[in-house]
Amino acid sequence: MSVESRSTTRRRYIARYLRDLRDSKRYTLEAAGRLLDRSPSSLSMIENARQGVRPRDLEHILRRYGVPIDGPDARGLIELTRQDTRSGWWAVYGDLMTPEALDLCSLEANTGSFRHLAVDSVPGLAQTEDYAAAMIMNQMGDIDGAIGRRYVEFRMERQQVLHGPHRPDLHFIIDESGLRRAPAGDRVMRVQLERLLQLSEHPGTTIQVRPYESLVLIGPPYSILQLARTNITLILVEQLFNRWVVDDQPKARQYQEAFTRASALLPTPAESRDIIHRIASAL
């Protein structure tokens, strides 16, 4: 009844949901095991995200716990299990990227809307190849040229999600400092800004700039991923050498509310286009 799980984020989300659900029913592992016709050890492995679960087995568990299968919670969880075992283009980079980075690509491939708050650089999904190469070399220092090119290739491949039939809605908030910092010179930065202007013309894309003089606090960079065909929102918080996912839904809503408040106080998309155009014209 187990299944190989490729996404640690999805597996952790399902695990916590089932663990909290069992606790709410006041079942011990032994009692739940008898109810679900599976061993307590197997159930413990699922609840601790050490083992995945097939969609039909998850349906069985939810039914026995009294969760309506046609309800939003059940539909979202079952969709997660379907997404969980699907591989994609990112699999060939398993020798280069961490499991967490590959997991992010899997989540992006199944995202209905993607919001990103960027502080000191252009978001990865919007980067040109030359800009991405400069950012990667600046961050990673003296690495082998062939390896560096594969990192750039990987970042460009991530942008496939913008060209497929299920393109997510995008909303970027970018600090002005990130638009004026040219890691590879003015020419590369000018092309990068033109790329942002092109993206902003897409009806599913919103780009806002936080000007230098703005008093709006935006905090560290993070992304908000609304997973397609679910009611589940994930927050990806990024630092230079670390990233982590917030999948607790009340906490995720706090990030969403903060993003919405900031967006309401910043220049409109049209005004932000003017800011980007002025910066590009000065290069």
Image: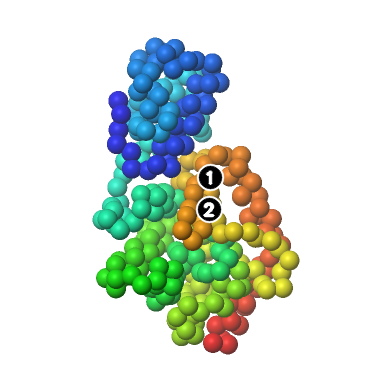
Label 2: state its secondary structure.
strand
Whether residue 47 sits left or right of residue 54 in the image: it is: right
Q: Quadrant of the C terminus?
A: bottom right
Say which amino acid is labelled 2. Answer: Val
Q: Residue placed farthest to the front in the image?
A: 142
- Horizontal and vertical percent position of residue 223: 53, 55
The residue sitting at 59% across, 59% down in the picture is 220
Pointer 1 residue:
246
Name the quarter where the N terminus is drawn.
Answer: top left
Classify 84 as above or below 175.
above
Residue 55 placement (x, y as % from top left): 35, 31
Residue 53 x %, y %:
35, 30
Percent across and percent down for residue 268 are 66, 67
Q: Are marks 2 and 1 in contact (CB under 8 Å)?
A: yes
User: What amino acid is at disc 1?
Assistant: Val
Q: Residues within 10 Å of mark 1 (few under 14, many from 20)?
A: some
Closest to the observer, 220 or 34:
220
Left or right relative to 104: residue 203: right
Residue at x 69% of width, y 61% of height: 217
Using a 10 Å C-alpha cutoff, classify the residue at mark 2 as few (fewer than 14 neighbours), some (14 to 19) or many (20 or more). some
* Label total for image: 2
Name the residue carrying label 2. Answer: 237
Instruction: Identify whether 92 is placed above or below 39.
Output: below
Query: Image point 57% across, 78% down: which residue?
Result: 180
Direction from residue 67 to residue 61 in the image, left or right: left
Distance from disc 2 to disc 1, alpha carbons, whole Å, reads 8 Å
- The answer to whether residue 59 of the structure is visible from this angle is no
Colouring scheme applied when the structure was drawn: rainbow
Please say if 42 is above or below 201: above
Q: Is residue 137 above or below residue 167?
A: below
